[in-house]
Amino acid sequence: GEAYNYDLCLSGLFNFVNGCLGLPWLVATTVPCIVHLNSLAEKDKDGKIISVQETRLTMLFSHLMVGLSLLVLELLQLLPMAVLYGVFLFMGLSALPAMQFWNRI
């Protein structure tokens, strides 16, 4: 819908500016955006989206958490890489059924 297009447009603009300045991208994938918008959507009985309640607080809090993670880098280095890979793999695979593109394949 409209909110999804606006969100992707802003993310693309911010990523372009950050890329030109040599800064890291704000959102590395679009999967969290799609899953987040599906969770904010009001749906009818058939599952069709009626409206989307748009919020920018999620992005604010997620970026604050990334920034605050810099304060606990020594603690994060104690986690094995296999654990992190497993968490990200689980998150990605669990988000697939909610994606319309994946259901069409």
Image: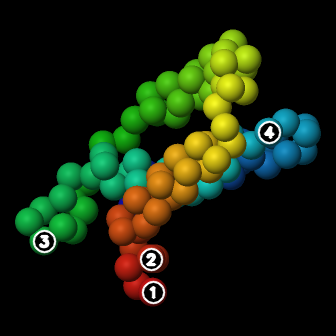
Foreground tag (3 vs 1): 1
For label 3, the SS is loop
For label 2, the SS is helix
Q: CA distance from mark 3 to mark 1?
A: 21 Å
Q: CA distance from mark 1 to mark 2?
A: 5 Å
CB under 8 Å between discs 1 and 2: yes
Q: Which residue is mark 3?
A: 46
CB under 8 Å between discs 1 and 4: no
Q: Which residue is mark 2?
A: 102
Q: How is the image coloured?
A: rainbow
Looking at the picture, tell me which residue is in the foreground, 9 or 36.
36
Q: CA distance from mark 4 to mark 3?
A: 40 Å
Q: Is residue 80 left or right of residue 55?
A: right
Q: Amino acid at mark 1?
A: Ile
Q: Quadrant of residue 80?
A: top right
Looking at the picture, tell me which residue is in the foreground, 12 or 24.
24
Q: Residue 33 has which mark?
A: none
Q: Which residue is mark 1?
A: 105
Mark 1 or mark 4, which has the lower sequence index? 4
For label 1, the SS is loop
Quadrant location, the N terminus = bottom left
Residue 13 appears at what percent x and percent y?
71, 48
